[in-house]
Image (tube, grey):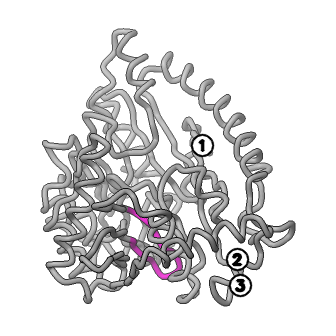
Amino acid sequence: MDDQTLEIRIEQGLDKIRPEQWDSLGVDYNPFLSHAFLHGLEIHGCVGDEFGWYPRHITIWEKDQLIAACPTYIKTNSYGEFVFDWSWASAYERSGGRYYPKIVCGIPYTPTPGKRLLVHPDHPDPKRLKLIMIDAAIEMTRNAEYSGMHWLFTDKDDTALLSDKGLIMRMGCQYHWHNNSYQDFDDFLSRFSSKKRKNVKRERRLVQEQNLKLETYEGPEISDELWETFYQFYVDTFDKKSGIPTLTLPFFKDMGRKLGKQIILIMASDRDGYVAGAINFASKDRLYGRYWGTRREDYDSLHFETCFYQGIEYAIDRGMHCYEPGAQGEHKIPRGFLPTPTWSAHWLNDQGFSDVIRRYCDQEIRLMKDQCKELFSLSPFREGAQPPEQLPPEDT
């Protein structure tokens, strides 16, 4: 490096980095970027050999002070990324290459946009440190002869910088809710068209008529017994879908202790006990819906109430700006969650393959923008009543 006061280190875990060091890097109360969350995944068996996530965090130090970092992993599969590249892997391997291992910068099992290039907020030249980390990641990928380096769910600033560096950009689409200074849930619904408003009210009424009780618990209020009940719902959901429940019960309990009120558990019960639950995480102004599970599938509209409407009420009550209920799901649109672009950036080692993927992604972006605009026609809001943040993307 040209500056002898800086040192790049590749850390195979966060155990040697103190929580206050990592969390000083502009994490901004984001639960998924916190030392507690990322280190919790490592110490509770949620990443590693069993699941193909191997921590290789890129860090920059200045006189033993951590000044920049990005959460980085060697991957031996594409599970838990939510930027789907299995077709890339298949094409790469059919042409005689080896797609795995690859390297990703992102949050395991967590498709939430946010900072990926973390820099101490007091540093005078954050852009330079970010560029150093990008170059270091590419160099690590090149030297190991891995197929590529991928930055997943980048925020606006990191997306712009990675694009300026000439990386391949890929657009996705999620469905987010934005607060338009709503006073309460009824005020929110008053902005809907009559038909869509009646549908939401009907769904909420159906839950009440089934004598279901909804309760909200924040981190310190969640007992071990409650965690064990929710965890069984979580595991059952993956079993029903033939998926892999990668997060462990000790991980959830640890997060309840360490993240405090940044963990919100919404539980539904009938007269025989709990029947369903959904877990949310929170930053200062955003709510993130993550996992849902139930022991019964025959309750009408319970999923919508537990995963959508209770979260919206929680966000309004606390003046939160945004609610991100998770990846995918066009069924979220008529309930107030509108199409929102997401971004990832990709560097591929094979130049010929890189050129093909770049053309593919360029075409995909055009199609995704058209799709987002078309999906806006399903918006439940009356004309002029939706938040300014949720306008159809024109030049995204």
> How many angstroms separate mark 3 from mark 1 (CA)?
33 Å
Residue 313 position by quadrant: bottom right
- Tell me which numbered mark, 3 or 1, is placed earlier along the sequence: 1
The residue type indicated by label 1 comes to Met
Residue at numbered disc 2:
189
Taking 354 as reference, is 374 above or below it?
below
Q: Secondary structure at mark 3?
A: helix
Percent across and percent down for residue 371 are 71, 41
Under mark 2, the amino acid is Leu
Q: Where is mark 1, residue-wise?
A: 171
As for residue 322 lying within the magenta part, the answer is no
Q: CA distance from mark 3 to mark 2?
A: 5 Å
Residue at 39% x, 9% y is 95
Q: Report the Cα–Cα distance between label 2 and label 1.
A: 30 Å
Give how far across and how far down residue 286 sits, in percent: 51, 75
Q: Nearer the viewer, residue 311 or 115?
A: 311
Disc nearest the viewer among 3 and 1: 3
* Residue range corresponding to the magenta coloring: 280-290
Q: Which mark is residue 187?
A: 3
Mark 2 vs mark 1: which is more N-terminal? 1
